[in-house]
Image: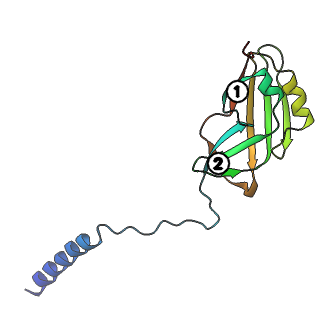
Amino acid sequence: MLTFRITITTVLLSVLSIIVFSGYKPAEKVSRYQAKELEIIVSLDEVQPGAITVKQVLALKQLNVKVANGGAQVARSFNILVMPKSGPSHFAKCVGNKFQSGAMDILRNCRPGDLILVSSIVLFGNAKYKTIVDPKWTVVADPK
């Protein structure tokens, strides 16, 4: 009889614990050094990825980085790659968010059909990020 009582008590306590604690989940461990990935949108001055005219390319001054949920970030450095429709590609590394003379030299030679890519963006605070739209532009002819 004693064994039967212990078994019933054990079963009842087991069922009760399943019912009471079924929604319980331990807190997720997050390191205080882990940062959430920022979702960013990259633009050349105010030109969003996509088509860019030769006139706009010649007037470029800086790379803008906006956080998707508002606010802005400043780039510490980035790479710019120009892939002409024919011929070798040109590459420049920029420090800060402004285009240096090396980058401006390769941008001055852009023609319709060329592709401009921005990569290896380093943000202040070493923030982790992912781009919402690929940072690439296709150079098109100026409207007449």
Residue 12 falls left or right of residue 53: left
Q: Residue at x 17, y 75 (%)?
A: 11
Q: Residue at x 75, y 17 (%)?
A: 142
Quarter of the C terminus within the rendering? top right
Q: Position of residue 24 (x, y in %)?
A: 34, 69
Of the pair 13 and 80, the residue shown nearer to us = 80
Query: Residue 16, relative to residue 44: is it above or below?
Result: below
Of the pair 11 and 15, the residue shown nearer to us = 15
Query: Residue 141, relative to residue 82: is it above or below?
Result: above
* Disc nearest the viewer among 1 and 2: 1
Q: How many marks?
A: 2
Give the alpha-carbon distance from disc 1 to disc 2, as whole Å.
20 Å
Quarter residue 132 falls in = top right
- Amino acid at dot 1: Trp
Residue found farthest to the left = 1
Q: Residue at x 62, y 44 (%)?
A: 130
Tell me the residue that label 1 is attached to.
137
Of the pair 110 and 7, the residue shown nearer to us = 110
Q: Residue at x 73, y 30 (%)?
A: 117
Tell me the residue that label 2 is attached to.
129
- Amino acid at dot 2: Tyr
> Dot 1: within a 10 Å radius of its alpha carbon, few (fewer than 14), some, or many (20 or more) residues?
many
Residue 76 falls left or right of residue 2: right
Label 1 vs 2, first from the N-terminus: 2
Query: SS at mark 2?
Result: strand
Query: Residue 15, relative to residue 87: is it above or below?
Result: below
